[in-house]
Amino acid sequence: MLYMETTYCSSTGISGDDEFFIRKNSIELGRLCSISSQADVYWPPHKRVRISAPFLFRETDFEQNKQPSINDLPGECIFEIFKRLPSGRERSLCACVPKRWLRLLSSIRKGEYGSSKVVKENIDSVSYAIETISSNENGGYLTRCLEGKKATDVRLAAVAVGTSGRGGLGKLSIRGSNSSCGVTNFGLSSIARGCPSLKSLSLWNVPHVGDVGLYEIAKECHLLEKLDLCQCPAVSSKGLIAIAENCLNLTALSIESCPKIGNESLQAVGKLCPKLQSISIKDCPLVGDHGVSSLFSLASSVLSKVKLEGLKISDFSLSVIGYYGKSVTNLMLSGLRNVSEKGFWVMGNAQGLQKLVSLMITSCRGLTDVSLEAMGKGCANLKQMCLRSCRFVSDDGLLAFSKSQGSLECLQLEECNKVTQSGIIGFLSNCGLKSLALVKCMGIRDISLDTPLSSPCNSLKSLSVKNCPGFGTASLAMVGNLCPQLQHVDLSGLYGITDAGLLPLLESCREGLAKVNLSGCLNLTDDIVLALTRLHGGTLELLNLDGCRRITDASLVAVADNCVFLGDLDVSRCAISDSGVAALSHAEQLNLQVVSFSGCLGVSNKSMPFLKQLGKTLVGLNLQHCNSISARTVELLVESLWRCDILF
């Protein structure tokens, strides 16, 4: 006997899980009515029905209509079935049904598939094709990156199941969040079981992943070569020790903001990872002298790239690096507050850094004139050096370094405020530099020197002076006389220079300038651009005039007439109009590839035919903040210039 009381909802009514709709796939009305002729049913046309009272079926009728389902089987049985699926395609299809199946599939290790001989033969028959497909993606293996809300256990399980049949995942990057539904040990364990071919793993901001997840990676992924841990507060030294004990192919390790990783893990890495070539440790409070010294003394034979930042190490660690860093080619030290002058002095005089090619030191109070001279003597093959916020380095230290160092090619000084114009001139005179960069060096003053300049520095090809307000007309004249072979000049942010100050530099460059960046030089006019294109139009490849508000269409006419090889032009926020764009488009020899008119209010819809003409060679066009150009014009340009990336 069935009693059913029904109501219906309007088109804006309530919807819920207990509703059903009248469709071809729904329960047939005749089938329901045959249950009992006394059923009182009202079916309003085209309305959704809400059941306010449950159906009352006879037990025998319900059992007759019930269909058997595979979900009724215990998990152990389904597990055994999934192990015998013939290929990754079938496993991926099964993973798309319920989450229960996905969890079961992700818990199967790759080696457990194909238990029977027949299934194993089927898998082997397609292995060659799978390897061929996977080898075409990013260096020969599959890569996946999950970021933000997409970084969940369910997605990781799906990745593990989906890639296991395509040769296996080779590189995985997870950029998570602090949400409660983020990646946990379960998701990482799924990757470990399904992707034993994993070679590179990057975990950023995954607070719910701990040692258990790394245990599984260490247990299954013996081919792991690169490991990057950033903001992993639950990972301790135990997890990293497990990696060191099982992943003997590890070549690169990066640890940042992991408060539970300490000295014992670094000792294990140095002892058990004979192929380790790169190490980066940043902001790990438990890492000290014991860990760093153990790492270098045990892994000194192949360790070539080292980055130590924000650590509580002392002079002892630097002395160990100086003695045992015989294979180190790249060294970066930053924010080492407990290191004194003695530590850098010993590191230089230890004579162990003979292969050092690149040195970067940032915010280290221990770097002084005395220790810098020692570094120059101990690093005979140094090619590149960058000093940032080293407030105790002065002209004396630079001069002493240049006299003891003959191989340096590139020097960058940033916020080294005790360095003056005299130190720069002395350095250029003694050292065969090819590239010099000065950024925010407030000690450089625009003064005329009473003493005559030394012999010219013919080796310097690139000069970059950014945001140094004291660098003006006199300094430009000095550089022009001292460095006649310049090819790349970057003077961005020098709002004090004028046409008269820059002209001597342009006239002294004998080889011809190829790249010129004058962005932010507010006082420059069309006259200097006319001189630049006249003197160096045959070699100029890049010209940046961003923010030079006194530059007009006359400069673009000069560019169109004289520049043959110019490929990159930036006239953002200049006084450019449609006439200037037209002049560029009419140039026969010009072959521009990237042009920026961002913020040029004088460029309007009238420039559309000229932009189309320019677009025949363009691959990049910036029209951002061009308020006189309509959205419709941009749409037409996008349709016409299909090869060009247009920013609007």
Image: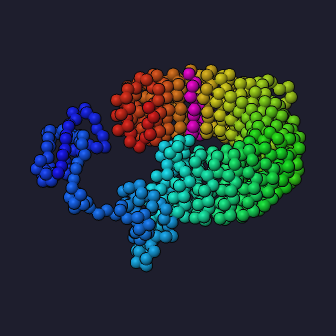
Q: Looking at the image, which residue is at 61% across and 33% down?
A: 517
Tell me, what colour scheme is on the image? rainbow
Specify whether residue 409 is in view.
no
Specify the quadrant of the image occupied by residue 60: bottom left
Q: Is residue 244 above or below residue 427?
A: below
The residue positioned 76% from the left and 58% from the top of the image is 267
Report which quarter residue 19 is drawn in.
top left
Q: Residue furthest left?
A: 37
Is residue 532 toward the left or the right of residue 402 in the image?
Answer: left
Measuring from the top left, give residue 398's x and y in whole percent: 83, 38
Task: Indicate the quadrant containing the C terminus: top left, top right, bottom left or bottom right.
Answer: top left
Which residue is more in the foreground, 127 or 284?
284
Q: Nearer the viewer, residue 299 or 330?
A: 299
Let me know if residue 547 is in the magenta part.
yes
Residue 341 shown in magenta: no
Where residue 52 sits, quadrant-wise, is top left
Residue displayed at 88% across by 48% down: 346
645 left or right of 22? Answer: right
x then y, percent, for residue 269: 72, 59
Q: Position of residue 452 (x, y in %)?
A: 84, 30
Residue in the foreground of this view, choosing between 351 and 29: 29
Rendered residue at 47%/56% (across/down): 157
Which of these two is toward me, 225 or 449?
A: 225
Asked whether the viewer can see residue 206, the reply is: yes
**Rendered location of residue 391, percent (x, y):** 80, 33
Q: Which residues are magenta?
A: 530-549
Number of marks in the image? Answer: 0
Q: On the rendered structure, is 422 left or right of 178? A: right
